[in-house]
Amino acid sequence: MSQVDSKTITEEVRAGHKEYLFPSVQAYYREPLVLVEGRGAIAVDSDGREYSDFFSGILTTSIGHCHPEVVERVREQIGRLNHTSTLYLNEPQVKTAQRLAQISPGALKKCFFSNSGTEAVETAIMLARIYTGRDEIVALRYAYSGRSTLATNMNAQAPWRPLSSSIPWIKHAMSPYCYRCPFGPPHDDCAEKFARDLEEVIVTTTNGKPAAFFAETIQGAGGFIVPPAGYFQRAAEIIRRYGGLLIMDEVQAGFGRTGDKWFGIEHWDVEPDIMVMAKGIASGFPVGATIAKKEIADAWTRKSISTFGGNPLSMVAAETTLDVMVREDVPGRAAQRGRQLREGLDSLYEKHSWIGEVRGMGLMQGMEIVTDRESKTPDPDRANALMEATREEGLLVGLGGISAHVVRVAPSLLITEEEVAVGLQKLSQACQKVSVKDSGE
Ligand SMILES: Cc1ncc(COP(=O)(O)O)c(C=O)c1O
């Protein structure tokens, strides 16, 4: 394709997006990127420009773009059978469910498949309410749970709540957000303080009989907020003492992303009653999954159908993704490459005082961008400038945080040492550009 042709296509897609899509479907960058191709940790735009993809379509192309084994299995399946509905059985669905039961912590055993994280969250909340015969759910502030009416009521960031609160049985406890600790020093027992707030919310804002506590293991859209050690043990103990279930959302942190373990919650030796998965589960195919302990899943005896949930195409993509992940020891690789990535980000922290904190686990790392380290004032303008600069350098990263001021870095879990080094180099150059602009040079 000539340069003129590709320019025309890019402009047509941008104009068409503006004209025919809801304005809520907001893309990154002043001039949004049109992606046309992907290979592993590389994405290619409509002008033929290659990018190191360090955001993986929001932590979703977990084993990279177009992994050859996934492509081959999907190709083979698409010519044979694409759809069954949940009224008929299909082998890939059962195999995927088996695999999930094998790698999930504790006694999580039975799955319900849907098409997105939002639906997986909906399923988990409904199941908890059916099983316990109770209504109230305690979630966390800074949460992101999706885009349905229920999920937007679970979201605890104003930009992700299009309507006023309409579900009175959802309550929010404090986020264990240590960088912005509301308790002040000393910071040695913050896990306990945040856990006490959860208990306070239960005894003051619910009837004392919550159906469940629902939390992301690392708050993703909230800005990769990692709770302090000990928080989830105490939270699990508290919610169970009040007769509620523990639901963990592993939509972002699952599938080896945090390094060494399959799921984020395993770092804290806590076994959830229900777990929610999506994004990286099928490396780009639309799959949501809710897994529960047998006796909990078995409580849902009325009918429920998901026309597309568990469809053979998505399921072969999930099954193959999981097979590759197990074979390649993705948790181990994420730990190793995560250390390399973290070292690189830590050295940027040493150079640039507008990086307030680097935090994360494994290949899920964030940099909180602030005006200065003392006031910790979020600096979305600089974060935006950094986004534009990374794009210019040929690097894709993401944004998060309540003010869109946390840069999120989460490449393919199969990324190589060399690819991490190249991406870090581009990030370093982008940071330099942003600093130079700042000093007016
Ligand atoms: C933690 C978490 N839960 C749920 C969701 C909703 O997933 P989806 O966008 O697939 O509906 C998201 C999406 O970003 C998420 O990050």
Image (cartoon, rainbow, N blue to C red):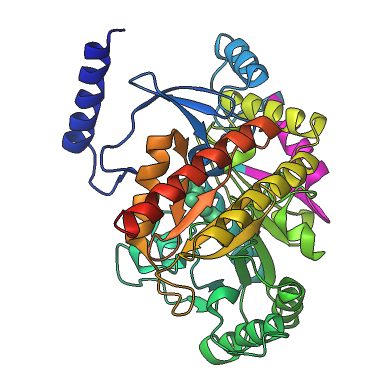
Query: Which span is picked out in magenta?
Result: 92-112
For residue 210, which quarter of the picture?
bottom right
* Residue located 43% across and 36% down the image: 393
Residue 419 in view of the camera: yes
- Residue 212 colored magenta? no
Residue 176 in view of the camera: no
Between 32 and 72, the residue placed more toward the observer is: 32
Residue 382 point in image, percent of width and height: 36, 58
* Residue located 48% across and 79% down the image: 374
Residue 439 point in image, percent of width and height: 34, 60
Residue 207 point in image, percent of width and height: 56, 87
User: Does 406 sit above or below residue 60?
Assistant: below
Q: With 199 as the anchor, is 17 left or right in this view?
A: left
- The mark total stands at 0
Q: With 374 as the anchor, is 319 left or right in this view?
A: right
* Residue located 74% across and 62% down the image: 272
User: Does 51 sit above or below residue 429?
Assistant: above
Q: With 135 as the anchor, is 193 left or right in this view?
A: right
Between 225 and 72, the residue placed more toward the observer is: 225
* Residue located 74% across and 77% down the image: 240
Q: What quarter of the picture does the N terminus occupy?
A: top left
For residue 228, which quarter of the picture?
bottom right
Residue 116 point in image, percent of width and height: 51, 43
Between 368 and 100, the residue placed more toward the observer is: 368
